[in-house]
């Protein structure tokens, strides 16, 4: 065969093969642009009134948590969300004080009233206090007596109407699930409690299930928000060092993996602070929006509006009055004073105790820390000149490790962007760009 004929045939064959290897491109879904009103409240730590200590008894549940007021605070939030309703309510864990079955049953009843009277869809996920908690106690005798807790199956049954019954998919090894409460908006609710000691951890199988769910959301063009109890991103520099149990283990790898699959927002709780912190990953920015505890100063929740899948804006709402509050002290002042009363005890459960012990200004250290912590809980914390002058005095007689500690704690005075209380995020027109090519409908 002449050479030019041979070349011609080779070109024809190559074209044929090339056509066989390039089937018609599948039609890609249009990227969803959901709009909805949302509320997020976290760590309500409800203790059923039937289990509460009698009025006037000495029981001190844990001072910074206003457990005795937990039912009244939750009732106030639910009343507000019935009066001024939203479409979707997310609750990222620690629904109960310590997983008491009676508290869970009451919580489910209250959430049922919220759904039926406001029309909202309510989705929950457990925190480290909610399931198989040996500390579940009945205080009604004036002493803590062990009481029934719930296991994972009972939790999913109790909250059947609040995520588990309407899930598109459930992880077989945890209480994680994916739901689609709003057309075009997928919520992946992550159970971050694989570590029985209460620290944030996911099993390898649950990580894989989450990635599969994110891939499914991408393939159908849904926007994705995630929620879990433990933090994904540090809310102040050094949180991962000094308060390790509050953040999810392997957080850097998870941040990369989830952002690469199109998740831009994770709603968390656990540390009891109103805070939003963003981090850049290879595929783009991801923001951890932490909501404080309803039973810890400033007893706030979030109201948000998602517009066109891209604009997330909202404000914090503080509970300033509850039913049957008869104290001469304003409720918010009482909540703030409770932080000061408990700061030392709380910090002494961490590594901080051994480091600061023996310093001449040890007690002053805890007093100043109470200020830093309450400012961090409130959110949008700013430079604190009182703290700066205290650090100067403290360092005059501090050891090297004490100097490192106080320097680390100083990061609590520097908020990480974005703003904490007035959330205003512009999300990507296409969060899947670079990892899949979806067409945006706008
Ligand atoms: Ca912030
Ligand atoms: Ca902050």
Image (spheres, grey):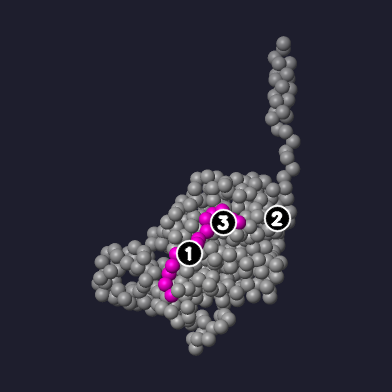
Vertical side of 212 occupied by 382: above or below: below
Give whichever of discs 2 and 3 has the lower sequence position: 3
Give left or right: position of 360 versus 120: left
Give the distance between the C-alpha atoms of the residues marked 2 and 1, in whole angstroms. Answer: 42 Å
Provide the residue designation for mark 2: 184
Residue in view at x 72 percent, y 47 percent:
29
Nearer the observer, 154 or 438: 154
Q: Is residue 143 magenta?
A: yes
Q: Is residue 390 above or below residue 5?
A: below
Q: Residues within 10 Å of mark 3 (few under 14, many from 20)?
A: some
> To which residue does mark 3 refer?
154
Which element carries disc 1, helix, strand or loop? Answer: loop
Q: Residue at x 47, y 69 (%)?
A: 138
Q: Which residue is mark 1?
A: 147
The CA span between labels 2 and 3 is 30 Å
Quarter occupied by the C terminus: bottom right
Q: Look at the image and tell me in which quarter the N terminus lies.
A: top right
The boundaries of the magenta stretch are 142-157
The residue shown at (59%, 56%) is 156
User: Foreground: 141 or 209?
Assistant: 141
Q: Is residue 209 above or below residue 307?
A: above
Q: Earlier in the sequence, mark 2 or mark 1?
A: 1
Q: How packed is label 1: few (under 14 Cα within 10 Å), some, or many (20 or more)?
A: some
188 with respect to 139 (left or right): right
Reading the chain from its start, which is encountered first: label 3 or label 1? 1
């Amino acid at each position: 065969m002449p050479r030019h004929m041979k070349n011609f045939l080779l070109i024809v064959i190559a074209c044929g093969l090339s056509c066989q290897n390039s089937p018609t491109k599948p039609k890609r879904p249009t990227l969803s642009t959901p709009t909805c009103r949302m509320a997020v409240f976290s760590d309500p730590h409800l203790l059923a009134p039937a289990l509460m200590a009698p009025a006037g008894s000495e029981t001190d549940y844990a001072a910074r948590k206003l457990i005795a007021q937990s039912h009244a605070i939750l009732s106030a939030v639910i009343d507000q969300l019935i009066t001024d309703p939203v479409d979707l309510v997310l609750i990222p864990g620690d629904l109960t004080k310590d997983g008491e079955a009676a508290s869970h049953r009451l919580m489910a009843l209250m959430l049922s009233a919220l759904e039926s009277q406001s029309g909202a869809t309510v989705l929950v996920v457990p925190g480290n206090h909610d399931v198989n908690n040996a500390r579940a106690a009945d205080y009604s005798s004036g002493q803590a007596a062990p009481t029934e807790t719930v296991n994972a199956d009972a939790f999913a049954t109790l909250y059947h109407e609040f995520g588990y019954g309407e899930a598109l998919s459930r992880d077989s090894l945890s209480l994680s699930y994916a739901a689609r409460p709003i057309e075009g908006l997928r919520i992946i609710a992550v159970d971050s409690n694989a570590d029985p000691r209460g620290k944030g951890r996911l099993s390898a199988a649950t990580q894989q299930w989450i990635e599969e769910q994110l891939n499914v959301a991408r393939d159908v063009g849904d926007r994705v928000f995630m929620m879990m109890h433990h933090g994904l991103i540090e809310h102040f520099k050094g949180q991962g060092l000094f308060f390790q149990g509050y953040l999810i283990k392997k957080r850097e790898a998870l941040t990369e993996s989830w952002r690469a699959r199109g998740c831009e927002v994770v709603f968390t709780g656990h540390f009891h602070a109103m805070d939003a912190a963003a981090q850049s990953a290879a595929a783009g920015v991801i923001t951890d929006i932490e909501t404080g505890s309803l039973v810890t100063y400033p007893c706030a929740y979030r109201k948000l509006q998602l517009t066109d899948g891209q604009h997330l804006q909202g404000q914090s709402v503080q509970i300033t009055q509850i039913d049957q509050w008869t104290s001469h002290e304003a409720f918010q002042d009482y909540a703030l004073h409770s932080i000061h009363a408990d700061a030392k005890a709380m910090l002494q459960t961490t590594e901080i105790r051994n480091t600061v012990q023996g310093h001449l200004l040890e007690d002053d250290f805890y007093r100043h820390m109470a200020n830093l912590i309450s400012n961090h809980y409130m959110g949008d914390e700013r430079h604190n000149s009182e703290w700066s002058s205290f650090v100067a005095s403290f360092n005059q007689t501090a050891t090297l490790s004490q100097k490192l500690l106080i320097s680390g704690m100083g990061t609590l005075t520097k908020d990480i962007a974005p703003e904490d209380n007035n959330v205003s995020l512009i999300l990507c027109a296409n969060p899947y760009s670079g990892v899949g090519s979806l067409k945006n409908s706008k």
